[in-house]
Image (cartoon, rainbow, N blue to C red):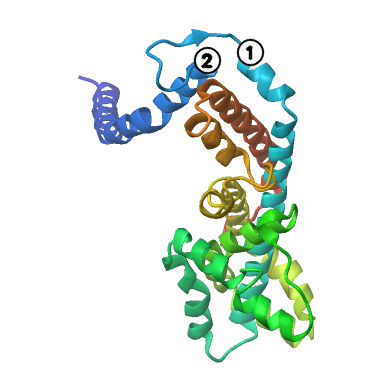
Amino acid sequence: MSGSTLIKRRMNKENWKAYCFLFPSILIFAIFMFWPFIYTVYLSFFEWNLISPTKEFVGLQNYKEVLSDPNTYKIFGNTFIYIVILLLLNCIVPYVFAFVIDLILKRFNGFYKGALFLPAFISLVVGSILFTWILNPISGPVAIILGWFGLEMPNWSKTDGWVISVLSLITSWKVFGYNFIVLYASINGVSRELIEAARLDNVPLWRIFFNIVLPMSSATGIYVLIITIVQGLQYVFTPIKVITQGGPNYASSNAIYHAYHEAFVLYRTGHSAALSILTMVIFLVLLIIEFKYVERGIYYEN
């Protein structure tokens, strides 16, 4: 038997071992990800209320009704606003904090890291209730303090604009610490010699951040960017559910919550499935754009 034949047999044997090790993971993915996705696509072509034993085939009617509903565009607009606010609070701000704490604040470094990460251990439901009390426009601590200066706190849960801002703040309070720790670890891995050489040359800190730290930690930065966009869809669901239930008049709803509301409150499963598929398509397009234009300038050695 030739040596090449033995190598091929050994490679085939190793391949089968690899497939056997992968099979449990593939099975879990198939049950909990691929099948729900296929079933959602299937439901988007039917009219069903989750109770009836039969489903009525309506073709593309659910998609037409979703796209012709003005509330759909309002909800997608809300989703975009959530993502923008969360990108500011959960991507840009923790980047700056991580840079300052790692390179400028030398004392109490561990305390700052622990304090910023602490809210990550607290349930978002508990955080939502806590912020509801703190920001109560009548009897909350913030309203009382503003009253000392003759200022009145707006009824944010019933006001367009304010409600999205506050719900984004609640979500950021929960997830800020995780993003901060990830970015801090990345910045901490940037060459100290390079940074010290720049400081010896009297390079301003803002230039060190933009010209050295940001490019060399960009791989982690893009990860946090994508995670933050996902948070704009998923994490904000909890404060919406606990505090506003999508109100007032869909002013605080986002794409994920509205899909839930359509299916499990209004029992319009076809509409919910169609909205879910449209949401997935939009974010797939955004992901493709990100890979095509943003990934080119990423530095992966750190």
Give residue 166's position: percent from left, percent from top.
Answer: 65, 61
Residue 80 versus residue 137 in the image, above or below: above
In-image side of 269 versus 97 (left or right)? left
Find disc 1 in the rendering and name its residue: 61
Return the disc, 1 or 2, that comes first in the chain's sequence: 2
Say above or below: 36 vs 155.
Answer: above
The mark found on residue 51 in the picture is none
For residue 143, say whether it is visible. yes
**Which of the 4 quarters of the picture holds residue 277?**
top right
Q: Position of residue 294 (x, y in %)?
A: 70, 46
User: Is 248 above or below relative to 280?
Assistant: below
| Residue type pointed to by label 1 | Gln
Relative to 212, 223 lies left or right = left
SS under mark 2: strand
State the quadrant of the C terminus.
bottom right
Please give the label number shown on residue 47: 2
